[in-house]
Amino acid sequence: MKSVFIVYNSYKDTSVKLYNDIKNKLKKLNIREENKENYKNADFMIVIGGDGTLLRASKYLVDENIPVIAINQGSLGFLTDIKTEETFEMINLFLENRYNYEERNFLELNVNNKIFYALNDIVISKNGILSRIKKIDLFSNGIYVNTYRADGIIFATPTGSTAYSLSSGGPIVHPKLKVTIITPIAPHTLSARPIIIDGDDIITFKVLENTDDLSITIDGQESINFTEKNMSIKLSKKKIILVKPENRDYYSILRTKLKWGDKLC
């Protein structure tokens, strides 16, 4: 008997309704639903909500190599790109092994040998609008890269290149590439541009001024205290598997969701 773990946005009525409809459908197909305590027993996962719901659900998948059917119940739905009306057709196609998939790497933050994982980005930033800009030395594999005077720095995966990094002037990067994107936030010089480095490079940094009002956020959902000692970032070998309809590709999602290539006037 196959089993599934379902994560949904419990604060949204439409997501709750769709969850109940899916649960009833899977029960008829003799597919068991796993609870949070037993999610590791699941053969696949279904996520119902927006991209934020998928980011939250992704933390269950760091060590689990199972496919994810991500159904959009949010606004943009760049990651959760399966439409609500496609839900049951997509579930049937998945169960018949008629689907495409994409693998997306996590970003790995090591703080004193404790590992945190981000699907989109890890952000070092100042706290509050009254905090002064920061001066941060950046190193890749111990080699000096640049000194940024900015409100902070975004370290993004290719998946996260269309999120906060893009809003801060970063590039769009295809998710198949094994790279890390470094994007300064509101830099104090026009020459401080984003850079893409090899995903295997280990990034370290040194803050040249007061670090008391700095914070680190992980996928915009978790915050930890900043400490530059024994802290590093790199692209992780761990990944999630996103189920995709056979007729959908990355570029069509860019055009549909971000209006990429549309005429401005």
Image: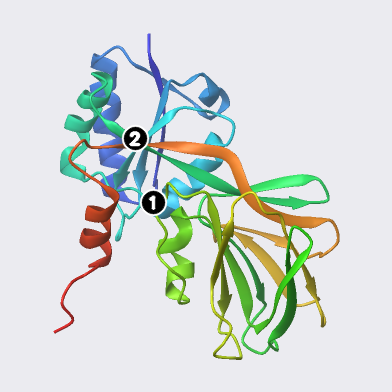
Label 2 to label 1, Cα distance in Å? 28 Å
**Sequence-first tag of 2 and 1:** 1
Among the 4 quarters of the image, the one containing residue 102: top left
State the residue at coordinates (64%, 76%): 152
Instruction: Give the labeled residue for mark 1.
Output: 11
Among the 4 quarters of the image, the one containing residue 3: top left
Tag on residue 101? 2
Quick check: 196 left or right of 13? Answer: right
Tag on residue 2? none
State the residue at coordinates (45%, 77%): 169
Q: Where in the figure is residue 111, as x and y percent of width and height? A: 78, 53
Q: Is residue 106 above or below residue 191?
A: above
Q: Is residue 43 above or below residue 85?
A: above
Local crowd size for mark 2, using a 10 Å CA cut-off: few (<14), some (14–19), many (≥20): some
Extreme residue toward the right, this view: 229
State the residue at coordinates (61%, 87%): 129
139 or 42: nearer the viewer: 139
Q: Where in the figure is residue 214, as x and y percent of width and height? A: 73, 74
